[in-house]
Amino acid sequence: MSIAETSRVEAIKWQDNQLLLLDQRILPEEELYLSYDDSDEVAKAITDMVVRGAPAIGITAAYGVVLAARRCFLESPEAWKGPLAERVRVLAASRPTAVNLFWALGKMDALIAKLDDGVNPEPLLLKMAIEIHDSDIAANRTMGEFGAELIAETQDAGRSVMTHCNTGALATGGVGTALGVIRTAFEKGLIDHVHADETRPWFQGARLTAWELMRDGIPVSLNVEGAAAHIMKTQDVSWVIVGADRITANGDVANKIGTYNLAVLALHHGVRFMVVAPSSTIDMALEHGDDIPIEERGPDEVVAVKGQRIAPEGVEVFNPVFDVTPADLIDVIVTEKGVVERPDAEKMALLMNNDRLH
């Protein structure tokens, strides 16, 4: 087992028949786990950003269904399916963009459909939730190896990389997606340094990514988003490596706001652009990125930092949480199923049909 895996923080735990979530709103100042035994409170935790990151949201929602099933069976053991369906709908409404949420709930719904009223659904649903969690851990390892191989093939391009938002253990069940690739590449001696965007307005890069990398002893420097072009021009950046919240059938990618900017800058500066995400992030029902629902959040996140106002009263705010990077700006998409270089609809279909592309 790698150093990163043995030292990684766990954002999600199932312990003593409860769901424990590391409150990511107060990191890095404090490490506090909040316990949940009610699915509606789990949904609120997702909305309120206690937990974030597409894979982690999906895993959390799966455990939320377990808690919902427990409550519904206790209250109505002979007719629990109707009340459970309503609680699942609340979980589904917690955040709109990350498709892993709906993928995980879909797997839980498929299992629920096979069960009979009068049978306690909790044990089987818990088994499924644990499988979803474990599969993400395994996928992280595989994606880390695939991505590191790509970096090894481009060693002449530079020994530092840039990343955006947080895609590590805090955003997944394992060592991370993009950060999993970075961790694996560092352990293999392929990179020396990471440039981490601070990632406004929630500062996931500053609060979470820098914290994770420092815990693992990986050299990292924090930068404002506006410095990205200068860094690409003046430093030995070989790759921009990011995660994804939804990938469409043609290879367009929705990710944290600011990702699209980086892809345009990377193209101009000859820096390669890698997207790392499990196949559960791929939504083949959506043809292209214009079909992705983009979550918008309230103005308070932009006009204030930790309660301290930094903008004038009454200013109008536009706060989209994600943007869409077109497939033609992406050099490679890395999944646990394989690697798609220069993604398009045909290559994405081959990947999802389990034809290995790597």
Image (spheres, grey):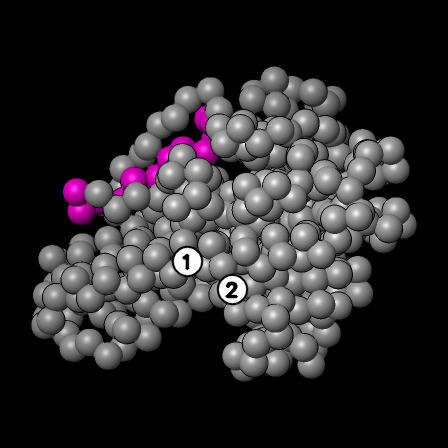
Most foreground residue, 96 or 8: 8
Residue at the spot 38% in from the left edge and 61% down from the top edge: 135
Distance between the alpha carbons at the discs numbered 1 and 2: 8 Å
Decide if residue 258 is on the left or right side of residue 109: right
Where is 288 relative to 151, above or below?
Answer: below
| Secondary structure under the numbered disc 1 in the rendered image | helix
Residue at the spot 10% in from the left edge and 72% down from the top edge: 118
In the image, what residue type sits under mark 1? Ala
Q: Is residue 99 visible?
A: no
Most foreground residue, 327 or 188: 188
Where is 188 relative to 80, above or below?
Answer: above
Residue occupied by mark 2: 336
Residue occupied by mark 1: 138
Residue at the spot 31% in from the left edge and 34% down from the top edge: 34
Where is 144 relative to 191, above or below?
Answer: below
Whether the residues at callouts 1 and 2 have beta carbons within 8 Å, the answer is yes
The first of marks 1 and 2 along the sequence is 1
State which region is magenta. 16-27
In the image, what residue type sits under mark 2? Glu
